[in-house]
Amino acid sequence: MPILCINAGLIIFVLLSLELMFYFKILENSGIRSITFPSKENENKITYLNQSPYIKFQANKEITSMGARGEDFTYTWKTDSLGFKNSQKILNKSKIDFIALGDSFTEGMGVATENTWTNILNNKYQITVYNAGVQGYSSSQMLGTLMLLKDKIDFQGVIIGALPGIYKREKYFIGSSKITNGTGGIESIRIARLTANNTFLAGFLRAVKNMLWIPKKLQNNRYLSEINTPDQEATLKVNPNWKMQLSNYKTIVNWAQKNKKKVYLIQFPQRHEVYFSESIQGLNSINETQYYVELTLLKKEFGSFIEIIDLYPPIKNSFVTNPKKLMYFKLDGHMNEYGQELVASSIFEVIKHFENH
């Protein structure tokens, strides 16, 4: 019995020592997040505005994503002089082809600035895109970002980065005259809060549990939990948040047309929509996914006025061709470096087609 107590004490001592080492950054690993207490340091990286987008990152600040998102995820990056995820040199260019509006998928959350799809378009395909995407943004904030930047950047066109399901974020902005918080990633950074689930000890114990008790089949299908029931087209059409999103997109499109600027709209597929067949998702056809329910309505609304780029086919085909080469992070649901390349090449092919005709 004394030996058991001594061994248990030693194990607890080692685990607590590791926790403290990660907390004080004696040991560091991007996939292991130690306890972080609420701090003004992160909140001071946020700017509050009296109008949309209400909340944004400050200029020239180092931003660190909250939560344990895996070892393949890049947590830290620096904003440019306007507070967005770009290399500063893009603002020095005399001509910017597009400004990209969107949320974390447009921002390229989880990859370094140089590996975002916007930056790949800049460097590899010579299509200059200013990345104005911000993690957690809604369409209301996309519109606000456009109004914020329209007189600060000389650009020729707009790329709207849509994501299935983000219309739900409009509930925070409908009828609100003063917003003091955000949603998603930027909100987690604003409050600088990590729960105990993200500590080293919790991660260690979770890994042990997975190794000992979770069957291999369930480990391989851990993304199945992401599958949810898609909206019906008829239900979505009357949803007030969806109507608000359409109204915001329409305002962006009308402004762009009035100012003789080209508009492209892209929509990012979600990880489970790419990794699983429609039958595994409980659907009769791919057209029933949230991705295509929303894209169909967007085409009906804007198909005659703007170019809509369907990213699903090239991304799905890449996965089917080589299922071991994944385009999303292993843990976090955003697109990794390879996913960014697929998005950039797909956009380039469409833009090249329309520019040549």
Image (tube, helix red, strand yellow):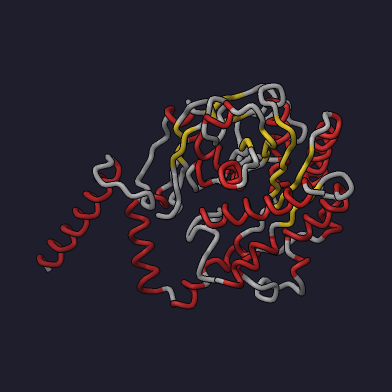
Q: Nearer the viewer, residue 347 or 203?
A: 347
In this view, the residue in front, 302 or 88, is: 88
State the image coordinates of residue 89 (x, y, percent, origin top left): 53, 30
Question: x and y percent of residue 293 in the render?
Answer: 79, 59
Q: How many marks?
A: 0
**Quarter of the image with the N terminus in it:** bottom left
Apparent side of residue 311 relative to residue 194 in the rendered image (left or right): right
Give the residue furthest to the front. 356
Quadrant position of residue 159:
top right
Q: Is residue 164 visible?
A: no
Residue 178 found in image quarter: top right
Residue at 19% from the left image edge and 53% from the top image edge: 13
Residue 23 image offset from top left, x and y in percent: 30, 42
Image position of 312 with respect to 159: above or below? below
Q: Residue at x 79, y 34 (%)?
A: 261
Report the side of 181 relative to 208 (left or right).
right
> Residue drawn at (50%, 48%), measured in percent from left and top?
110
Horizontal arrangement in the rendering, residue 319 relative to residue 331 (left or right): right
Viewer-side residue, 7 vs 120:
120
147 horizontally vs 213: left or right: right
Q: Position of residue 264 (x, y in %)?
A: 76, 45
Residue farthest left in this picture: 2
Picture layout, residue 99 above or below residue 8 = above
Using the image, determine if residue 17 lies above or below residue 11. above
Look at 57% across and 56% down and name the residue there.
339
Quarter residue 70 falls in: bottom left
Q: Can residue 116 be seen by looking at this rendering?
A: yes
